[in-house]
Image (tube, grey):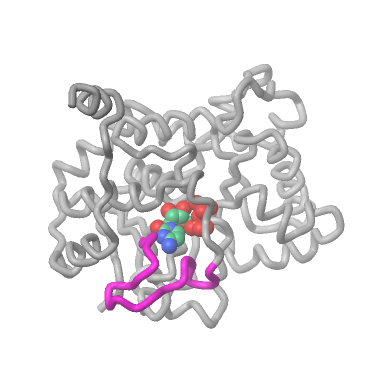
Amino acid sequence: CLLVLCWFYVYPVYRLPRDKDVTEEVLRQGDAWTKNQTGIDLFRKLLTECCDPGRMFAVTKENSPLGKVLWYDGEFYHSHTVNNETYSLFVQDNPLQLPLKKCAVVGNGGILRHSKCGQDIDQADFIMRCNLPPVSKQYTEDVGTRTHLVTANPSIIEKRFQNLLWSRKAFVDSMKAYGSSYIYMPAFSMKPGTDLSLRAHYALSDASSELTMLFANPEFLRTVGKFWKSRNVHAKRLSTGLFLVSLALGLCEEVTAYGFWPFSMGLDGQPISHHYYDNILPDKWFHAMPEEFMQLWQLHKSGTLRMRVGHCP
Ligand code: CDP
């Protein structure tokens, strides 16, 4: 018996509620949401203290001068020393007009399908999307059309655009869907991602694209990771969506999140796909999306962040 007690002491058990319980809780709450300005201010203060998103979210000439060592956040003991080539690709300073007012963070969850949230999303002042998602006509009713910042993982460049070795035009053309937004790439998270991100930058600038490339600052990604680790998110790496929600909570006056529902059943108990556009599942050991969801849901209940799950009225 003593042994069991020791075990619990050393390895506390973090029990996640069952999907069914989460669904019931979300349904019980319904559409009710009351903004809590004190909660919003407090959370922004916490994020500013830990991670300084306004200054640090992107690699800039100001925070990463020539010779600065950028430590990769996704790999141990790898770094990039800022040189003439990379420095010339950094923006001068944080390009966003802060604070941003109403922000929408759009996750890629299948819950968005048939949600009719497109209009709602498009009404936000600043719209963030994850991983170059499709925003073509067949989806706009559910996910909207406007984008101000979209993340692009280098692995997408590798898989979808064959490392940009011979399909630069296809890449540049498909980026037109995001208008004149910022494309936010974690260029210094994993070593192989650096070349791919630089190549994406060159492809866009050679084609005089309207998009502006921003490289995610690995220091920011690391501090945000630590921030959530201390709040019981036990993932090897945070999901892109949680990074973006954290960024938005640090930069915006009000944040609404859409498409965050990492469960296999919808609110009506029917199976749903993982993404609104396909059903390719994530690597379970890498992300801890249900754990993340519970954190976001707590913020929703406290009036700090608004989560839209299911239909938009
Ligand atoms: O690259 P990653 O697996 O993080 O993301 P994704 O599948 O492209 O989806 C973008 C984000 O939406 C994720 O990072 C999650 O935060 C969120 N998501 C969710 O909450 N529920 C889902 N079923 C799918 C995505």
Q: Magenta part mainly helix, strand or loop?
A: loop
| Residue placed furthest toward the front | 1
Above or below residue 58? Residue 97 is: below
Q: Write the residue at 39% across / 67% down.
A: 264
Above or below residue 281? Residue 5 is: above
Query: Where's the C terminus, which quadrant?
Result: bottom left
Q: Is residue 103 left or right of residue 146?
A: left
Q: Write the residue at 18% across / 69% down.
A: 27
Report x, y in % for residue 260: 37, 60
Q: Write the residue at 49% across / 67% down.
A: 275
Q: Is residue 126 visible?
A: no
Report x, y in % for residue 42: 20, 36
- Asked whether residue 274 is drawn in magenta, I would say yes
Numbered label tally: 0
The image quarter in which residue 60 lies = top right
Q: Is residue 131 left or right of residue 27?
A: right
Query: Where's the N terminus, which quadrant?
Result: top left
In this picture, which residue range is highlighted in magenta? 261-279
| Residue placed furthest toward the right | 166
Q: Is residue 247 visible?
A: yes
- Asked whether residue 201 is drawn in magenta, I would say no
Residue nearer the viewer, 139 or 100: 139
Q: Write the residue at 47% across / 30% down.
A: 222
The image quarter in which residue 102 lies = bottom left
Report x, y in % for residue 299: 23, 48
Report x, y in % for residue 110: 43, 70
Residue nearer the viewer, 129 or 211: 129
Q: Is residue 309 left or right of residue 96?
A: left
Residue nearer the viewer, 24 or 32: 24
